[in-house]
Image (cartoon, coloured by chain):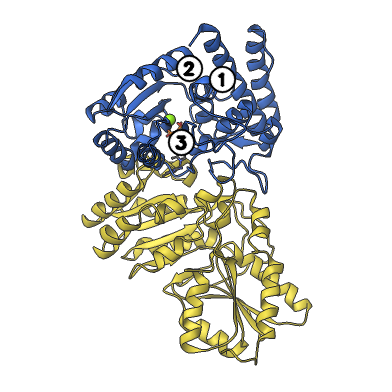
Chain colours: A yellow, B blue
């Protein structure tokens, strides 16, 4: 891990999908086993340049997500390294059994990329808004789940995932997100990336809520609360040590995810806390509610995922310190 | 159905395009290609073929419509508004915060939408379920279904096709909007679907193919489909993706496009010229 922070809170020049696809093309140039499988959303997922570079190693199955995942499993059984692309809802809900049996249970080597997590599905609306994808994937044994934060992390994670064996689920916004890391930063899968130190509370965030969490820490600083911020970009396996340490050193935790509070980051942290280090824990995320259509800014407010929502939750967690947790 | 009625359906199709473009033009983008290609079939269904009561969308004597290619919501909403389910001004709330008109069809939000769709492939099964329910309830309402041609890639479509034939679901009339394109390009280049009408026929369906931009042919095909006792029916509509919209029709990748106010205005003006030629206003 070698992290340089970029503290401008400005949008990336490059879209997540382009950072991803460029990296995959670079990797595929020297690793002939890398192949792409798609399901008629190549233009949306940004994988057309891969197809142009490697037409023989790209299989656009059409609108057949289940078939795509099965084909990926078969390719993997012959030593290929398939990267399967579609929107997060289809990459998880629609193909759950194919992922479970054909990929995971069969111990094959398939990388699944799910676009448009949570509110980034925006104008595609409630049918397309995955608040449950991590919940579905997290219950599948040996699955690794990663939510890259920005283009720099996307590039680094793509390289690492290509080099590792197993079934991976990467959920990522497709378009330009806020830049958090300086060029050249590297990360360790399974290890939380510390963003800011603090002593009163720890905000554990992932995805587009990482930047909100950093802004929340600024708000809290103005209120005399010192907040630590951890980027939990690997949701599974979760970094138990970092959570326990944060609980012991700051005494209160808040999770912030662009997902349901059921099944994802908030649940994973709650499991660690309940078993190891009882401290007040509050969760930011969709509260057992379906998504809806609208611009991302509106949805962030609607689903209480803004920096001020996070700051308010942190205050609540801090206020519970020392009170009975029973 | 008389000539005059069919002429009116053709005009209604143009009006559906105009209203759809107004809403998408205001929003700035949309699934233009597949919304334009179904204007005629929507005009036929809402312009006289379906038994409906727009003032009472839940009327239990009505015919149902499942728009399985749910991303065409905007043109379905235009058809519903023009049929009198809600005011046309409401169309401009498309995709706005709190709207009743989301990108994809939602039965709980929009009066007149009978089934929630958006995940391709699912509408065929729900339509069959509705038809079976009607049969159990001793009702003879028709269930209409609109599928995309790309959508027919999905395995679930062919599960439904087998199952509906087995159960002789003859109150089901499906349309396939065969506009030859899906999101990433031509269906033929991605996962070749040619011979769709024949494929349905092989599975035991009553199968027809007509010009999907000719209201008269669609009406005649529906009448024939209703004669097909003991078999579900499919009408494959030969259509053009983006049909009638000057900035979309000639473009190869016209599934989802950014639409500036000028583009929308120009396309609407062209459609209105056509309408004026028939002595109508939108
Ligand atoms: C299960 C599923 N996979 C992918 C999508 C994304 N998607 C929306 S529309 C579309 C293309 C549809 O093509 P087609 O059925 O031919 O519709 P049309 O040409 O009429 O727009 C795709 C891939 C989806 N909505 N559902
Ligand atoms: Mg099509």
Distance between the Cα atoms at labels 1 and 2? 9 Å
Q: Is residue A25 visible?
A: no
Query: What crowding class fits label 2: few (fewer than 14 Cα within 10 Å), some (14-19), or many (20 or more)?
Result: many
User: Which residue is label 1 attached to?
Assistant: B13
Q: What residue is shown at x 50% (from left), y 53% (from top)?
A: A19
* Rendered view: B175 above or below B118: above
Q: Which chain carries label 2?
A: B
Label 3 vs label 2: CA separation?
A: 20 Å
Can you give x and y, in whole percent of width and height, for residue A183 in the image?
57, 62
At 62% across and 60% down in the image, what residue appears? A179
Q: Which of marks 3 and 1 is in front?
A: 3
Q: Is residue A188 visible?
A: yes
Chain for disc number 3 = B
Rendered location of residue A72, percent (x, y) = 29, 52
Whether tag 3 and tag 1 are in contact, CB under 8 A, the answer is: no
Helix, strand or loop for disc 1:
helix
Q: Name the residue under label 2.
A: B213
Q: Reading the chain from its start, which is encountered first: label 3 or label 1?
A: 1
Which chain is disc 1 placed on?
Answer: B
Point out the tag, 3 or 2, that comes first from the N-terminus: 3
Q: What element carries label 2?
A: loop
Q: Are marks 1 and 2 in contact (CB under 8 Å)?
A: yes
CB-based contact (under 8 Å), mark 3 and mark 2: no
Disc number placed over residue B66 in the picture, else none: 3
Q: Which of B133 and A229 is in front in this view?
A: B133
Point out the tag, 1 or 2, that comes first from the N-terminus: 1
In the picture, the quarter occupied by the C terminus of chain B is: top right
Q: Residue sitting at 39 percent across and 36 percent down?
A: B151
Looking at the image, residue A162 sits to the left or right of residue A315; the answer is: left
At label 3, counting other C-alpha atoms closer than 10 Å, the crowd grade (few under 14, some 14-19, many 20 or more) is many
- Please rate how many residues cluster around mark 1, counting C-alpha atoms within 10 Å: few if below 14, some from 14 to 19, many from 20: many
């Amino acid at each position: 891990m070698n992290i340089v922070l970029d503290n401008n809170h400005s949008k990336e020049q490059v879209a997540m999908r382009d950072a991803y696809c460029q990296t995959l093309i670079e990797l595929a140039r020297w690793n002939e086993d890398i192949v792409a499988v798609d399901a008629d959303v190549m233009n949306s997922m940004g994988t057309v340049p891969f197809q142009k570079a490697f037409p023989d190693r790209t299989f656009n199955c059409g609108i057949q997500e289940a078939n795509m995942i099965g084909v990926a499993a078969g390719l993997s059984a012959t030593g290929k390294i398939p990267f399967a692309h579609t929107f997060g809802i289809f990459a998880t809900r629609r193909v759950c059994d194919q992922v479970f049996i054909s990929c995971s249970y069969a111990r094959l080597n398939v990388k699944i990329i799910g676009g448009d997590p949570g509110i980034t599905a925006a104008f595609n609306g409630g049918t397309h808004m995955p608040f449950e994808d991590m919940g579905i994937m997290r219950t599948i044994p040996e699955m690794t789940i990663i939510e890259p934060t920005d283009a720099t992390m996307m590039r680094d994670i793509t390289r690492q995932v290509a080099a590792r064996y197993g079934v991976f689920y990467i959920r990522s916004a497709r378009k330009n997100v806020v830049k958090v890391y300086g060029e050249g930063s590297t990360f360790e899968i399974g290890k939380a990336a510390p963003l800011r130190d603090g002593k009163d509370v720890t905000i554990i965030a992932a995805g587009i809520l990482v930047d909100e969490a950093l802004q929340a820490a600024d708000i809290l600083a103005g209120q005399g609360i010192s907040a630590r911020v951890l980027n939990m970009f690997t949701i599974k396996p979760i970094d138990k040590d970092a959570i326990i340490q944060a609980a012991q050193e700051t005494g209160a935790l808040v999770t912030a995810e662009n997902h349901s509070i059921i099944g994802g980051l908030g649940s994973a942290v709650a499991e660690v806390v309940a078993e190891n280090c009882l401290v007040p824990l509050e969760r930011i995320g969709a509260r057992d509610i379906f998504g809806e259509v609208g611009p991302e800014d509106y949805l962030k407010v609607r689903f209480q995922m803004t920096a001020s929502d996070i700051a308010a939750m942190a205050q609540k967690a801090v206020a519970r310190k020392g009170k009975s947790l029973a | 159905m008389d000539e005059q009625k069919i002429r009116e359906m053709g005009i209604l199709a143009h009006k559906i395009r105009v209203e759809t473009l107004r809403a998408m033009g205001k929003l700035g983008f949309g699934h233009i290609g597949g919304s334009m290609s179904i204007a005629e079939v929507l005009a036929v269904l809402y312009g006289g073929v379906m038994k409906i009561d727009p003032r009472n969308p839940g009327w239990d004597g009505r015919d149902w419509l499942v728009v399985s290619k749910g991303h065409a919501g905007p043109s379905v909403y235009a058809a519903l508004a023009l049929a009198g389910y809600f005011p046309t001004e409401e169309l401009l709330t498309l995709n706005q915060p709190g709207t009743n008109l989301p990108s994809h069809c939602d039965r709980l939000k929009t009066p007149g939408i009978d089934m929630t769709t958006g995940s391709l492939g699912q509408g065929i099964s729900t339509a069959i379920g509705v038809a079976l329910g009607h049969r159990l309830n001793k009702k003879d309402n028709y269930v209409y279904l609109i599928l995309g041609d790309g959508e027919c890639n999905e395995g679930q479509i062919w599960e439904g096709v087998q199952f509906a034939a087995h159960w002789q679901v003859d109150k089901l009339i499906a349309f396939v909007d065969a506009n030859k394109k899906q999101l990433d390009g031509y269906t033929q280049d991605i996962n070749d679907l040619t011979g769709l009408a024949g494929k349905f026929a092989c599975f035991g369906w009553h199968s027809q193919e007509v010009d999907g931009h000719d209201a008269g042919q669609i009406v005649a095909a529906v009448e024939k489909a209703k004669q097909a006792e003991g078999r579900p029916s499919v009408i494959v509509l030969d259509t053009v993706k983006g049909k009638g919209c000057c900035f979309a029709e000639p473009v190869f990748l016209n599934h989802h496009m950014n639409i500036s106010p000028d583009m929308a205005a120009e396309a609407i003006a062209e459609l209105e010229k056509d309408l004026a030629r028939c002595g109508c206003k939108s």
